Image: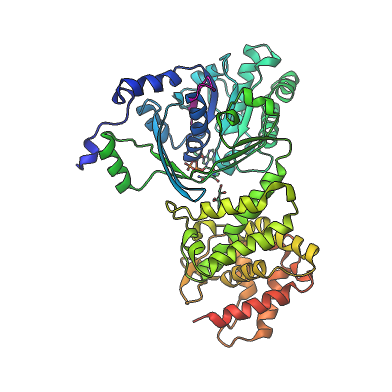
């Protein structure tokens, strides 16, 4: 048995009288939030924010945390086992300076497994103090899955479960308009609030609930579209956790880590900050009238730069974002691509895009995070279509020519994604000849494999390359349109691909 396993588990009674008093003071507050999801992100973002606001005496409530699916109750058990406590480590660069902060988060007053405590879960719906439902169940969790409701049995899906929960509340308070809840689904889907409301309305029809209930849902519950942004990296390495445990004298199995940057844009009335006092607690939370610019800004600049650097970086043997940003050629190239090609194409002068881009670069350079290009490259064709291609196409319209860096990034992606189907999956090739596993939709990879079939990269025939490129660009199932019809694009890409071909060893 290692020394660390002998240390006691984090519990309230290990904190000393002052620590206990501070934590209890928050834990014993009335339940204001039902949280669906116990993952790293919610604990490192929303719960951390609520705790900060509570600590400042602004948010007078606590959170009941529940798990969103029948499997994976382990984390919930761990939270229960630690009296709801966990340590949050914030670290990275902020305005050029290294930040490292450790906080004890004590916002959870109860943990509940709705699949084993269905009745108790429904009883929460009857709490007069309840005001919010917050979730993050990944893109897979926030969707309508047809199901039936059986008295006394839990519904599996998150929206299905919430429908029964809201119906219980509606009945208990006899449709009182003031008892509706504020819903903040944090899943990374455009119009996440609208998606949740429509799932609930659909389930309520399936479950045979009344029209009056549906009116109460629509008129007296708020479903707020919102955009979250923070890189939450979860547990530290085992070695680091052991070292921390030694220093603290107890073991925390729920240590969470995140970057200092945090941003939450919520489409809703600023007056709601009275109920959810996050902005007034100094947190980077914005109540906005129109979420779209924030979404576009994040997807095109942050995610766009990630997608742009991933294929070209992998082709050149790079592993991580920071390493790519620190490279004397790639670093300036990415910065120029963003400032000179992505930002101008957005035409959003009032949104401090260049400043946002600089913040993004600082986040990319976070010395504590090794963000793998391979992970970012997962499903890259679909991501490129949404995160980079619209910029490339709109730049063309406004400037009348093709942006050289985005074209280079696109050619890197096309060069890497010339798949060969092997027994280990579809593989591409780096410039040094090393094989790279390509992780994308099998249909996408099969289509690309067919387009590049029998391509002879040894003899370097420009005409043959031109033919293959024509086939790939014309495949509108990949790009949403026939890109070969875009004047001059194929020629621009062809020139870049010939250069890449020349760099192959
Ligand atoms: N970690 C980050 O930096 C970060 C930043 C912004 C957004 N996000 C998004 O947040 C989501 C969760 O990330 P995380 O870091 O908390 O991961 P995590 O693995 O710690 O948590 C995932 C959570 O989603 C639930 N879940 C997974 N599949 C589900 C399904 N099919 N139905 C219902 N629930 C399901 C899990 O039970 C768990 O509660 C991801 O989709 C990610 O894109 C993460
Ligand atoms: O999470 P993905 O796979 O959709 O995209 C990869 C990254 O661009 C993404 O994880 C960002 O780091 C994140 O969106 C920052 O909030």
Which residue is rendered at x = 58% and y = 69% of the image? Answer: 417
Q: Is residue 83 left or right of residue 470?
A: left
From the top left corner, tell me how far across and down residue 53 is, in percent.
Answer: 52, 27
Nearer to us in this view, 175 or 46:
46
Quarter-wise, where is residue 229 in the image? top right
- Residue 294 sits above or below residue 306 on the image: above
Which residue is rendered at x = 51% and y = 76% of the image? Answer: 431
Decide if residue 86 is in sight here. Answer: yes
From the top left corner, tell me how far across and down residue 348 is, in percent.
Answer: 74, 50
Q: Is residue 372 left or right of residue 450?
A: left
Residue placed furthest toward the bottom: 459
From the top left corner, tell me how far across and down residue 51 is, in percent.
Answer: 48, 28
Residue stretch rendered in magenta on the structure? 56-67
Nearer to us in this view, 467 or 133:
133
| Quadrant assignment for the N terminus | top left
- Residue 82 sits above or below residue 188 on the image: above
From the top left corner, tell me how far across and down residue 248 is, in percent.
Answer: 28, 35
Nearer to us in this view, 482 or 317:
317
């Amino acid at each position: 048995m290692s020394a660390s396993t002998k240390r006691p588990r984090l519990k309230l009674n290990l904190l000393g009288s002052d620590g206990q008093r501070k934590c209890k003071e928050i834990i014993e507050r009335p339940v204001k939030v039902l949280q669906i999801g116990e993952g790293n992100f919610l604990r490192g973002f929303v719960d951390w924010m609520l705790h900060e606001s509570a600590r400042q005496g602004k948010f007078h409530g606590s959170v009941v945390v529940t798990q969103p699916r029948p499997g994976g109750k382990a984390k919930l058990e761990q939270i229960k086992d630690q009296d709801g406590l966990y340590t949050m480590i914030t670290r990275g660069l902020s305005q050029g300076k290294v930040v490292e902060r450790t906080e004890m988060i004590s916002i959870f007053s109860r943990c509940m497994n709705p699949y084993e405590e269905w009745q108790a879960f429904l009883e929460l719906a009857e709490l007069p103090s309840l005001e919010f439902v917050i979730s993050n169940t990944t893109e897979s969790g926030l969707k309508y899955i047809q199901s039936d409701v059986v008295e006394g049995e839990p519904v599996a899906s998150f929206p299905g479960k919430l429908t029964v929960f809201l119906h219980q509340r509606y009945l208990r308070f006899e449709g009182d308009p003031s008892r509706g809840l504020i819903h903040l689904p944090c899943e990374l889907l455009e119009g996440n609030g609208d998606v949740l409301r429509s799932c609930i309305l659909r389930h309520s029809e399936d479950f045979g609930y009344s029209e009056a209930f549906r009116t109460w849902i629509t008129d007296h519950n708020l479903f707020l579209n919102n955009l979250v942004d923070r890189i939450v990296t979860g547990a530290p390495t085992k070695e680091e956790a052991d070292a921390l445990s030694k220093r603290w004298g107890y073991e925390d199995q729920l240590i969470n880590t995140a970057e200092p940057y945090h941003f939450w844009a919520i489409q809703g009335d600023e007056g709601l900050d009275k109920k959810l006092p996050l902005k007034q607690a100094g947190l980077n939370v914005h109540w906005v009238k129109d979420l779209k610019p924030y979404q576009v800004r994040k997807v095109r600049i942050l995610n766009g730069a990630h997608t742009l650097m991933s294929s070209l970086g992998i082709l050149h043997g790079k592993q991580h974002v920071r390493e790519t940003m620190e490279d004397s050629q790639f670093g300036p190239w990415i910065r120029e691509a963003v400032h000179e090609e992505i930002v101008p194409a957005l035409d959003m002068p009032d949104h401090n895009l260049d400043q946002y881009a600089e913040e993004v670069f600082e986040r990319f350079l976070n010395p504590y995070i090794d963000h793998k290009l391979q992970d970012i490259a997962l499903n890259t064709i679909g991501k490129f279509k949404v995160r980079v291609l619209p910029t490339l196409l709109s730049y063309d319209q406004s400037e009348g020519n093709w942006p050289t860096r985005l074209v280079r990034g696109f050619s890197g992606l096309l060069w890497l994604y010339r798949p060969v189907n092997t027994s280990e999956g579809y593989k591409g090739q780096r410039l040094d000849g090393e094989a790279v596993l390509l992780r994308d939709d099998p249909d996408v990879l099969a289509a690309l494999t067919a387009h590049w079939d029998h391509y002879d990269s040894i003899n370097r025939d420009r005409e043959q390359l031109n033919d293959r490129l024509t086939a790939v660009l014309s495949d509108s199932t990949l790009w949403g349109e026939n890109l070969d019809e875009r004047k001059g694009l194929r020629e621009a890409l062809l020139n870049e691909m010939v250069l890449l071909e020349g760099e192959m060893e």
